[in-house]
Amino acid sequence: MNSLRIKPMRIKLLATFVIVWGYSILSTSQAQSIQINGLIEAGYVDAQYDNSWLKSWMEGGVGVLRFNQDDQFVLSQAVLDIKGDAVGNISYHMVANYYPDGDSHLGLSEAFLTYAPLSRGLKHQLKVGMFYPAMSLENVDIGWNSPYTYSFSAINAWVAEEIRTLGAEWSVTRSGRKHHSPHSFTAVASVFKANDPAGTLLAWRGWALHNRQTMLNEKVYFADYFQFGMFDKPFPDYLTVSEETDGRWGYYLGLNWRYLQSTDLRVYYYDNNADPLAIETNWQYAWENRFTSVALQHKFTDQLRILAQWMDGKTGMGTQDKGVYANFSSWYLLASYEWQQQRFSIRYDNFDVTETDNNPADPNNSNGDSITIAWRYTVDNHWNIGAEWLSVTSNNQNRTLWRNWQAENKQRQLMLLAQYRF
């Protein structure tokens, strides 16, 4: 490729966390409170694929589900969520995750400090560290899980994979209660680094549905499309989400609106401001990734609610002739009904990736849809059990690079799970 600028500069995220966490530990003698919560999720999985060669991307395959046909009894995840007051108006929050699959089994998905000074008028808050942008109304449970289904929507499964920032977020909230109004507003602005590879999975694997979150400095593998010699250099068949390649600052902006306790709307614009010609020594590129996300929740009653989210954006690396560029979009609609100790949820997802580069040797078009039905039963304060059935049809053109492999395939998955919380 032309005009490449190799910039191996990286941010030492682990060192940053050690500083943040060490500071909070040193302050425990003055701490006002500390909360330690956890979750362990395990059970039975029955995955059925149209073709035996369709394996999970977690094992370098071209499937869009986390589990394979030979996965049966699994430990899906374990989460440890620690938060508390450090000193003054500063609090800390850390989320540690364990997964039996993937490149890393134990690590951090979030670690940050929050400064929230007391105020009679507008409420200000500053967050510093590694965290998710708060654009999801689906992932509001402990450890950024969903209380509705066990598998995330395609949108938030991708956010869990590829969107993680190291930086600062400032928010300003106008409380409706303080101003005797049914309307509350929050404006959000953030600058960050360390999310340069965002978009890699969407372009080469497409959207997926699962609950696997990428952890600090973890590598996420996908199928080795580069064995077909479509590029001059052998790019790595993985990405490191927390990579800083070009030294640029990214940003996102958000606006949240709440009407009483019934309606929530979140609108976000994200731009990692990456240089698509910046490249690591291992030939991992920075991906110029930007998108808009709109999320809505409306509670008809205390028992019945709907959630919806739409995301639309573009990503790319290299040049138009010898690189990869694509537009991506997805949306979902979820309905959930709570009756006594039970919750019933159903979600429809639709997703699409459209290639926009001039490189026919590397097909990146993909699309599909899915239906997810889930049931949960709360046994007591610690235990809940449930079941989820998911059916997804995906049409990924790069599967045809392998001889006699078809672009369109259907995958179905039944999960019977138990969660223990503490």
Image: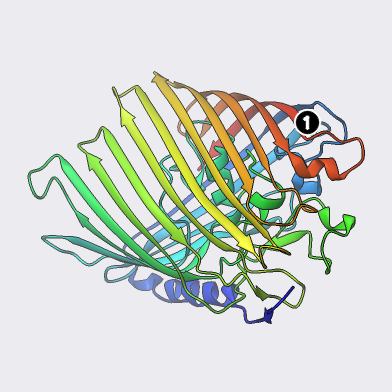
User: Residue 20 vs residue 276: left or right?
Assistant: left
Q: Which sits in the foreground, 234 or 354?
A: 354
Based on the displayed image, in which of its 4 quarters is residue 283 positioned? bottom right
- Mark 1 burial class by Cα count in 10 Å: few <14, some 14-19, many 20+: some
Q: Residue at x 74, y 37 (%)?
A: 67
Type of the residue with mark 1 = Gln
Q: Residue at x 59, y 56 (%)?
A: 162
Position of residue 46 relative to residue 41, above or below, is: above
Based on the displayed image, in which of its 4 quarters is residue 150 positioned? top right
Q: Which sits in the foreground, 212 or 189?
A: 189
Label 1 SS: loop
Q: Residue furthest right?
A: 403
Position of residue 168 relative to residue 226, above or below, is: below
Q: Residue at x 57, y 47 (%)?
A: 328
Question: Residue 298: where, in percent of width, then height?
Answer: 32, 30
Q: Which residue is mark 1?
A: 72
